[in-house]
Image: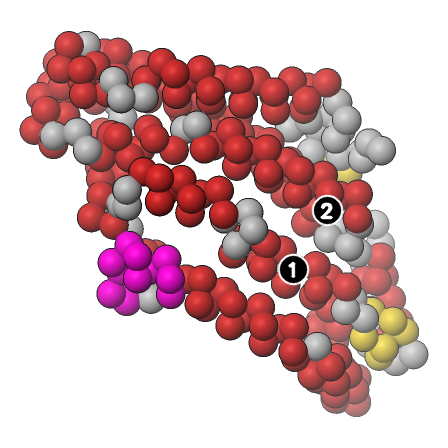
Amino acid sequence: MDFENRIGLPKALAGVAEIGSEPDLGVLPEWNLADLYPSTGSAEFADDMARSHRDAVQFEENHKGKLADLLAGNPDGLGAAIAGYEEIEARMGRIMSYAGLLYAGNTTDPALAKFYGDAQEQITNAGSHLLFFGLELNRLDADAIAEGMEKSAALRHYKPWLDDLRMDKPYQLEDRIELLFHEKSVTGHAAWNRLFDETMAGLRFVIGGRELTVEPALNLLQDRNREVREEAAREIGRVLHANERIFTLITNTLAKDKEIADRWRGFEDIADSRHL
């Protein structure tokens, strides 16, 4: 099934004005994703997905294990390699932006959830063939890179990106471990984040005789009518308490997942990775 590219806000928002005292909002804005792809089943989307995987495999074959020689003998060639990497990453980012925005528009739709999950899996697989690039770049001698930049404007163009990349170097693991972290991300923290999002989206709150999703229910906590605010607070508390076991499991699992990753990489503080 194809999905159109216009995503509106949840229909439950329309009932908020009838409970509280806010005016009718009328026609609400929509996302128009046609600038990304015409539809989920479009040839453009399928072609970009196939091309991303094909280009990633070819990129790995062309450059893996060869960056040091490329830097020494042809720094312009290394600049061109980074440009090629950038192009593939940009296309994959476009694919996941499209899939992610469609999914965010209605996380309770099974077809959209499947579309997003399939896209995430395929992009992760393609990304496995690109993972070597940043790792290998970080193993290049810093002085050799600086010398290469002096000789090549193409390489010098990417100095800010290379500087940012090298900040990860002290926390970089052996290549196969990095690959394991990368491939397991789909079944690790990303899966638990998705479970949280879908669980929250599936919650229903009965306030003022109407069944609402979480966003309009939370909005009623700011209603000018104290009785509406109180009813909303009690109902939100009741529903969240009824689901506390799954939220506790999600939170504890994500916390442990991050602790393991931080320990392996050598981060001393829980927030260190955010400052790179």
Q: Is residue 208 visible?
A: yes
Q: Residue 45 magenta-drawn?
A: no
Q: Which residue is mark 2?
A: 113
Where is residue 252? Give x, y as percent.
51, 72
Compared across the picture, whether 108 is left or right of 271 comes to right
* Residue that extends furthest to the front in the rendered view of this protein: 176
Q: Amino acid at mark 1?
A: Leu
In what element is the residue under mark 2?
helix
Which residue is located at x 26 percent, y 60 percent?
A: 267
Label 1 residue SS: helix
Q: CA distance from mark 2 to mark 1?
A: 11 Å
Type of amino acid under label 2: Ala
* Residue shown at 54% from the left, 23% from the top: 53
Q: Is residue 191 above or below residue 169?
A: below
Identify the residue under disc 1: 195
Q: Earlier in the sequence, mark 2 or mark 1?
A: 2
Quadrant where the N terminus is found in the figure? top right
